[in-house]
Image (cartoon, grey):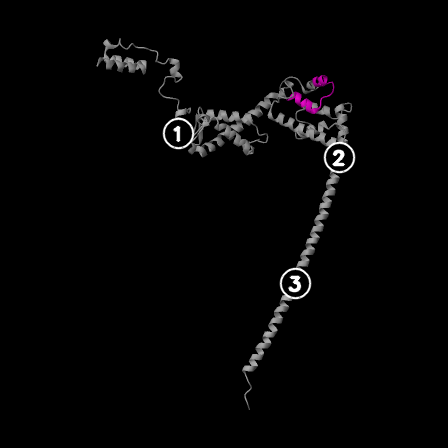
């Protein structure tokens, strides 16, 4: 019996220092020496705070065991282990702050340049945001519709805040101009290039960080730059194809004005006070090339308009001819139908005449004249 009790105390000691201590108290102080008390298995304060040694696991983070139990249909358990479990309470995602943080982060990873409001964000971009959101959270499949609806509500709210933050940052940024005026920027850039900067070059200098020409200060600046490059490439290819020669100068100012959405009262977005310097400067290489290119572009435009008018006239004549042919065919069809009706009526009248004659002959045979 003594050996059996000693084995029981030893097994209790393996399960933890507290258990062995409890057994030793039950057995009495005379038996505590056989199973010495050890604090090796007692968790420290830091470990207890972090959950190490605790008998209750974190209920918010999905573990392998409960994943296999609750989501046994999912083959690749590793793809969902570690995600935060979320739910919907009163139509809202919970935990709200963590969901909002991930949603906003995904907005920054992929931007819809036409998405000026949440309603104008394209469906493929929305799907991208939701699929990225799914990579960080997990929920019961029976709540898929409720989670998606709550996510749309939260995403629309966060997108409005996201756009507002961009507008505020743009207002405060002053395009990195600081205390230096646009005129001073123009002089420094002209000294650096050895010539007057084009509007696009000036825009790149004042709308990129550290004036590197690549890291734009906001989304709008990058959009304008991309549009400018596209317009310029198209203009160069068009000029080269029409002249069959080498590169020809293009109207930098006209292209830039088109890229920024036009000018308003001789003020051009991104140029500030420098806009006036691009008008009426006959001794500027930029304006010389601009004037020459403008004249040529006007001639090309007139030729294109003449070609368009010619095409429209040809189409109009063709349309009139087709209309006349259609009317003639319709008139011919009507005549044929009228002739067919006349022939049909004639056939009907011819068939009715013999039948009436036969009918009258039968009547005479059946009614003989009585003798006198």
Q: Quadrant of residue 6?
A: top left
- The CA span between labels 2 and 1 is 70 Å
The residue that appears at 67% across and 23% down in the rendered structure is 203
Quadrant of the rendering where the N terminus is positioned:
top left
Q: Give the left or right position of residue 23, taking residue 209 as reference.
A: left
Sequence-earlier tag: 2 or 3: 2
Residue closer to the observer: 370 or 73: 73
Farthest left residue in view: 1
Q: Which residue is mark 3?
A: 338
| Segment colored magenta | 187-207
Q: In the structure shown, which secondary structural element does the residue marked by tag 1 occupy? A: helix
Q: Give the left or right position of residue 238, taking residue 218 as reference.
A: right
Q: Main secondary structure of the magenta part?
A: helix
Q: Position of residue 201 (x, y in %)?
A: 69, 22
- Residue 46 seen from this side: yes
- The CA span between labels 2 and 3 is 57 Å
Q: Position of residue 236 (x, y in %)?
A: 72, 29
Q: Which residue is mark 2?
A: 300
Crowdedness of circle 3 by 10 Å Cα count: few (<14), some, many (20+)? Answer: few
Q: Which residue is mark 1?
A: 70
Q: Nearer the viewer, mark 1 or mark 3?
A: 1
Sequence-earlier tag: 1 or 3: 1
Residue closer to the observer: 237 or 201: 237
CB within 8 Å, label 1 to label 3: no
Task: Tell me: residue 212, above or below residue 130.
Answer: above
CB within 8 Å, label 2 to label 1: no
Is 112 contained in the magenta span? no
């Amino acid at each position: 019996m003594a050996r059996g009790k000693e084995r029981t105390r030893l097994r209790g000691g393996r399960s933890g220092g507290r258990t062995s201590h409890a057994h030793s108290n039950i057995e009495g102080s005379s038996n505590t020496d056989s199973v010495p008390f050890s604090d090796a298995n007692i968790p420290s304060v830091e470990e207890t705070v972090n959950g190490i040694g605790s008998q209750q696991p974190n209920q918010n983070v999905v573990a392998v065991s409960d994943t296999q139990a609750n989501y046994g249909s999912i083959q690749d358990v590793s793809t969902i282990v570690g995600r935060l479990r979320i739910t919907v309470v009163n139509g809202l995602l919970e935990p709200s702050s963590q969901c909002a943080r991930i949603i906003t982060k995904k907005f920054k990873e992929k931007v819809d340049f036409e998405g000026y409001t949440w309603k104008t964000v394209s469906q493929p971009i929305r799907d991208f945001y939701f699929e990225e959101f799914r990579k960080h959270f997990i929920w019961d499949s029976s709540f898929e519709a409720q989670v998606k609806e709550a996510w749309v509500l939260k995403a629309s709210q966060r997108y409005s805040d996201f756009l507002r933050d961009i507008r505020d940052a743009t207002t405060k940024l002053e395009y990195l101009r600081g205390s230096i005026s646009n005129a001073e920027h123009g002089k420094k850039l002209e000294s650096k290039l050895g010539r007057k900067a084009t509007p696009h070059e000036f825009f790149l200098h004042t709308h990129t960080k550290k004036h590197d020409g690549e890291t734009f200060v906001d989304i709008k600046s990058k959009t304008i730059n991309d549009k400018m490059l596209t317009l310029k490439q198209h203009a160069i290819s068009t000029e080269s194809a029409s002249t069959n020669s080498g590169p020809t100068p293009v109207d930098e100012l006209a292209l830039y004005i088109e890229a920024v959405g036009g000018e308003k009262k001789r003020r051009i977005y991104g140029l500030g006070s420098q806009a006036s310097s691009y008008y009426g400067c006959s001794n500027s290489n930029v304006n010389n090339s601009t004037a020459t290119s403008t004249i040529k572009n006007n001639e090309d435009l007139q030729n294109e308009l003449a070609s368009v008018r010619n095409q429209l006239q040809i189409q109009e004549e063709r349309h009139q001819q087709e209309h006349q042919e259609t009317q003639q065919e319709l008139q011919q069809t009507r005549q044929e139908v009228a002739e067919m009706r006349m022939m049909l009526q004639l056939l009907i009248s011819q068939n009715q005449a013999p039948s009436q004659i036969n009918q009258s002959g039968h009547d005479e045979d059946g009614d003989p004249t009585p003798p006198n």
